[in-house]
Amino acid sequence: MVKKKVLRRKVKKKVAKKRPAAAPVRLTSRDKKTMTSLVGLADKVVTAADRKRDPQLEIPTRSLSNVNYNRSKKIIEMGKNTTTRQLFNLSQAKSFMQTILVGSGTKQLIEQGKTTSIRGLYYLLKHTIKGTKEETFNEQSECDPVIEDVEVLLNSLREELHLYAQKRGDMVGDIVLQDSGDEIDCSRMGSGGYGIPSIVEPEVIQFKKCGAKFILHVEKDTVWQRFNEDKFWRKHRCILTHGAGQPPRGVRRLLHRMHNELKLPVYCLLDNDPWGYYIYSVIKQGSINLAFESRRMAIPGAKYMGLRSKDFIRCGLSDSVTINLNDTDKKRAKQIANYPWFTHKKPWQKEIKQMLDNGFKLEVEALISKDISYVTEEYVPARLKDQDWLD
């Protein structure tokens, strides 16, 4: 046994000698800014401890009660309310520790020039606290909101903390990108398209050439596949995207960048139901949970192209394609109608009221009952020509 241990030590020493020295990591200007914020966060805790004061964090409250609608900017903004998190408060000590732990983990990622998923960070930080049976995190659902707390505390995007979420969403169209040094021609991506990554910041993705006139964002990949197969994007010179339901942050951020940097209008083809209305609201004004990032994600100029409540009659659809509204749908529709950014818009109030009066909702796929390519060859071209959308 002793001989085996000695042998292992010798092998380890030999392996260690052969490892090349790691190349120094070059931090971007964003990395340096984020690192300064992270170190500043730690310094505040140390300073409080040195002065024998209770270390505490003032975290902006992420709830509807602390969200304001800026009518001039037409986006949701976070208010000034904060929640205090103290180390020596028994009910807050663990969440305080978790917050500092997430900050430490992201600092490690930036220093090493590496990224990981939010799932990866959870495992990186998960361990049993020495001398106890207490885990730092019991579930990932306990870790995720703390990551968002750190984002808002530092006023940084998750991606600036070198974290990415699950990739969800595709793109195809007349645009050439450079992604991490690789040139990507989105007009030559076949049936699958270009998978939109979670991190789409300028350091990662640059726009090289764009011949598109607008962006058509559809709700689901099934609808996106129809548009891609029919080469709608080529005929109408556009960029076609989807977010597999509510678009993830990478998709929203990329849409925001293309809209603002390439000056491309954004049209949204979504289901005629409360969920479709909500998705549009998130794309246009920003989300309540991420109100602090609306300026980098929201697209106030985005237009809602459909499906519309009046399309049941206008398109001559049959009763067989309708889906009855349930109590949850009705309640959600009324909540959306009362959003400050919808209350003063008569066309939207009329739209939501008509859906409630109809008593049913419609999915974009319902148009297939007319013809397999009705949505690409007739419905959307007509909406574009007539400029028939909701703002």
Image (spheres, rainbow, N blue to C red):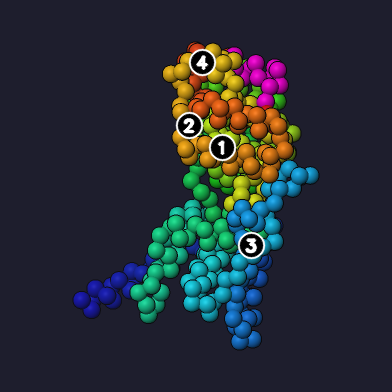
Query: Which label was assigned to residue 60?
Result: 3
Q: Nearer the observer, disc 3 or disc 1?
A: 1
> Which is in the foreground here, disc 4 or disc 1?
1
User: On the rendered image, what quadrant is the C terminus found in?
Assistant: top right
What amino acid type should be assigned to the residue bearing mark 2? Leu
Decide which of tag 3 and tag 1 comes sooner along the chain.
3
Query: Is residue 385 part of the magenta span, yes or no?
Result: yes
Specify the farthest residue to the right: 72
Residue plotted at (27% across, 75% down):
5
Cα separation, mark 4 vs mark 1, equals: 22 Å
Q: Amino acid at mark 3?
A: Pro
For mark 1, what is the residue?
A: 333
- Badge nearest the viewer, 2 or 4: 2
Give the SS element for disc 3.
Answer: strand
Compared to residue 338, the image places residue 240 above or below, namely above
The amino acid beneath tag 1 is Ala
Q: Is residue 272 above or below residue 169?
A: above
Q: Position of residue 255 (x, y in %)?
A: 64, 38
94, above or below 214, in the image? below
Q: Which residue is mark 4?
A: 317
Q: Which residue is mark 2?
A: 325
Question: Whole-Å distance between the Cαs marked 3 and 4?
Answer: 47 Å
Q: Inspect this view and state whether residue 20 appears.
A: yes
Magenta stretch encompasses residue 7: no
